[in-house]
Image (cartoon, rainbow, N blue to C red):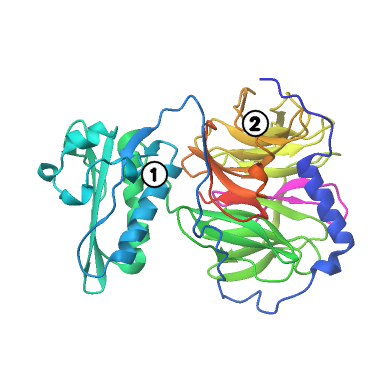
Amino acid sequence: MVIKVVPFLPRALATLFALSMLLAGGSAFAQQDTKDDGSEQASEDGSGKGIDIDVTVGVQRKLIPLAVPDVKEPGGDTGEVADQVQEILRRDLKLSGFFKILPNDSFFFDPSKEGMGASQIKFQNWFNVGAQGLIKSAVRTNDDKVVLDLRLYGVEQGQQAKLKWTGGAVPKDEVAEKVHDFANAVLEYYTGERGIFGSRIAYVRRKGQSKQVYVMQLGADGAARISKNNSINMLPSWGKGAIYYTSYKHGNPDLWVYEGGKRRKLSSKPGQNTGADYCGGKLAVTLSKGGENTDIYLIDPKSGKVQKRLTKHWSIDTSPSFSPDCSRIAFVSGRSGGPQIYVMDADGSNQKRLTYQGSYNTQPSWSPKGDAIAFSARDERNAFDIFTVDLDGNIERLTQDQGNNSDPSFSPDGRYVVFVSDRGGKGKRVWMMTADGEVQNAITEGSGYQSPAWER
């Protein structure tokens, strides 16, 4: 596929130029919060509360029809918990991109009159409404715990599926985690790979005149605020038990780390300290070091000390993204005249251009499967869209004709990509799509989102 693009300021480079402009007026963003170095974790963003999921499904994908009738309540005051279980199940399975959840009003019979066992279920009724799978669920209270009974049945077989999941009694605050795990087991049963529900995504959202870093759990309501100041915070990424992000708290774009409930400055060299990416004890970051050219370096993840300079070129090199085995790094360089995706060995050797189609390719994210790199590009309509490129340079388009789409980040299993889109006139929201682009879902409400980063 040929990507037709128009000359434009490279997005990754534009970010750096924007940072430079902020530096020029850095004091405006240096409003300090004396609590920023403390351990208070956070206010709620409310990004996922009550969201009505928007879904786009490609014509090539055939979804598995699942029936998820209301949760049974054998006894006790479990109405609120039953609603929670029902909401999580339906939302997770819908977001997965593999299932079509049949509407409850399509049932021409009363599912509540059925029991939980196979002998108590009229499978012919479920077959007649088009269900391939049936999820039966029941909750009851036992002292201060909730007993969960969740089962998947094959409708045509009339048998309970064997899942890698065990029910039982759990504390109320662990119900969501247990239900996410059941949804992951259902996905594994049908696809052979466990799901990613309950995984975490960091992102940036505007809060008044500032921008703050938050973390949300996929399929859950609300989000925890990570940065805590009145400044600009941006470009979050995940490390081992840590989150890295760039902050203008002290005027300069410094690299900070949030670890163990505390925030501390990691790299504060004059100029850019941005775009960190961690892998196997290595931390790649973009530095300009007080007026020097912008290049990619390895720094110590604990001390911030520079270990090695990986690129040294007259053009800007930025946006490092490690391969899953930590042996290679994808990055953006303008050395060919416009921003393109390059790859190099993790020691900086064997630097090679990967994208040759289009003149504006940025924001690489290497798939955990190792076979593709997602990136954003500006196309012939002056809009940003998401693409993937394999290591032979073959490109596939994932988004098209739906506003601007940017900031891709792969899921831990490589089957999904999270990104930002302004489609539908609802502002910039976080979306999630299957890695082939066939199913796309909005996973936040409101607007003002950017830079989602999936924990791996």
Q: What span is colored magenta in the figure? A: 277-301
Mark 1 residue element: helix
Of residues 451 and 78, the one nearer the viewer is 78
Q: Earlier in the sequence, mark 2 or mark 1?
A: 1
Mark 2 residue element: loop
- Identify the residue at horizontal 82%, vertical 57% (top origin): 271
Residue 452 location in percent, x, y?
Answer: 61, 50
Amino acid on which disc 1 is placed: Leu
Of residues 444 and 232, the one nearer the viewer is 444
Of residues 84 and 113, the one nearer the viewer is 113
Q: Give neighbour class at mark 2: few <14, some 14-19, many 20+ (Cα, 10 Å).
A: some
Residue 279 is a magenta residue: yes
- Identify the residue at horizontal 27%, vertical 55% (top origin): 71
* 219 in relation to 437, above or below: below
- Residue at image mark 2: 400
- Identify the residue at horizontal 50%, vertical 25% (top origin): 59
Quarter of the figure with the N terminus: top right
Residue 137 location in percent, x, y?
Answer: 25, 52
- Residue at image mark 1: 93
Q: Is residue 107 left or right of residue 348?
A: left
Residue 190, image quadrant: top left
